[in-house]
Image (tube, rainbow, N blue to C red):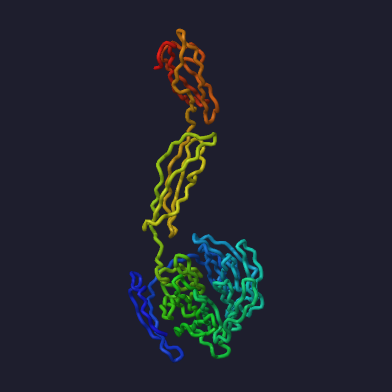
Amino acid sequence: MPFKFDPNLLSSKAILITFFVLFSSGSVVFAQSSGQCTANVFVEGTIAGFGGTAVMLTMDAQDNLYIADNVNNAGALPQGPLVFKVTPQGAISLIVPPGELGDVTGLAFDAQGNLYVADGNGNGNGQPQPKNMVWKVSPSGVITPFISGVNNPTGLAFDEAQNLYVASFNDQAVYKYSLAGAFLGVVTSGLPDGPYGIALDAAGNLFVAGFAAGGAASGNAFGTRIYKVTPQGERSVFVDPGFPDPHSLVFDQQGYLYASYYNSLKILRIAPDGSYTVFPGGCSGDDAANGLAIDSNGTLYAVVNGGRTTAQQAVLKIYGVVPGSSPPSTSFPRLTVPGNMLFAAESPSGSVVNYNTTAVDENFASATVTCSHPSGSIFPIGTTQITCTAVDGSGNFSAPATFHITVVDGPPNLFLPSDFEIGTSSAGAQVLYVALADDTLSGPVPVQCSPASGVIFPIGNTTVNCSATDGAGNTASGSFNIHVFTSTQSDG
């Protein structure tokens, strides 16, 4: 295996690099090891609700984490086998309840959001009898059989054409099925080891984790290798670090492959050319890493057994293993809300009010603002307190911020004539005009004007003053001018 220096290790979090040499099958294998990463517990023990050792992980398009959980003697309830969903915010729900599965070993999503569950038990380890099939779980939660008769299925993976690859631990082979469940053939067979996790790269190459127990009976098992199978079916050893039991495989968006080495308590980051970096399985120390998954932000999730880096079985969020990933910010987003606002009612229901809020994290990236009364909604007459909070991409919440929107019943709308003039041949003229008023709550209200419409206006200019009062006592007032002239006078 060639050694390749990885410049991604030269960071503030990875500056101490050591080299070591491993011997495997008579060949010298070089690896580089940093061990510099940061981790925190995402879910743990009875907090997460899973009762056994979580075996495999997968992630959906919304970064929800799915945990395949089997059975051991941890004593937590409910006991597996079952499948849990954990949202990015940590909310947990049961997707496949106890009683549906014989056992569980693998998970994968198709492009339509259907979850596929491998009902096998891998190397056994005291687990219940599997049903040797693959189940399909629709986005609405309907569970149906998809493939039956697979000899101890373990890893699952989809290719770009949405064909499903299924590893058979006992057959030491990988099979391919269509999205309709039709058998499409053998991808690879005669593996020296029992295949566990599988993954496909962007070029359609299949990678297979060779767990020792599958071929142990024949005496030719290695149990240390990750195999590569080309689309043409050519198989080769991609990585062999010399220590046992590769378990779960997952690719990041940059083409790096990640492998958990269960009994060796390690995680490998493997470059496309096969060079690799070794990390402790629990980041802060060696631990039995099971399933792996990577979210859209490049955060690596790993299940550990507990008793080493964590007190109980746990899912860790690990930063610094995937190049470019970093621990989330712990600072609060900065939230800005408007000052108190006053509006006149537009209808008996109140008024539609629009307002602006902003929030940014410590890197000035936008944070999401949620308010108790959204902008653009109808605010009733009276004073409403609006409380807003912001959450950034790392899940940090701002302190609540409040402001008030007051909607009042304003005065009536007064509709008066424009200034006008009228000619007469006498000493004055009778003038008729129309003045109206309408109120948002009271509707039409009477208008009082002086001089009133219909009276005799003298020669010259007269100002008419009008007012209207609604049922709440709000008064509107206005005026206009009437000019009366004799027929012998010129206009103006």
Task: Give the answer, above or below, for where 429 lies relative to 11.
Answer: above
- Residue 125: give x, y in percent of width and height: 57, 79
- Residue 137: give x, y in percent of width and height: 62, 66
Quick one: 364 or 448, which is closer to the camera?
A: 448
| Quadrant (top left, top right, bottom left, bottom right) of the C terminus | top left
* Residue sitting at x 41%, y 12%: 489
- Can residue 80 be seen here? The reply is no
Q: Is residue 295 left or right of residue 81?
A: left
| Quadrant (top left, top right, bottom left, bottom right) of the N terminus | bottom left
> Looking at the image, which residue sits at the far top?
427
> Looking at the image, which residue sits at the far bottom?
26
Task: Give the answer, above or below, for where 87 lies relative to 265.
Answer: above
Task: Give the answer, above or below, for where 391 lies relative to 99.
Answer: above
- Residue 24: give x, y in percent of width and height: 45, 88
Q: Quadrant of residue 79?
A: bottom right
Quick one: 377 or 195, which is closer to the camera?
A: 377
- Can residue 200 be seen here? The reply is yes
Quick one: 134 or 247, which is closer to the camera?
A: 134
- Residue 223: give x, y in percent of width and height: 51, 84
* Residue sitting at x 39%, y 60%: 329
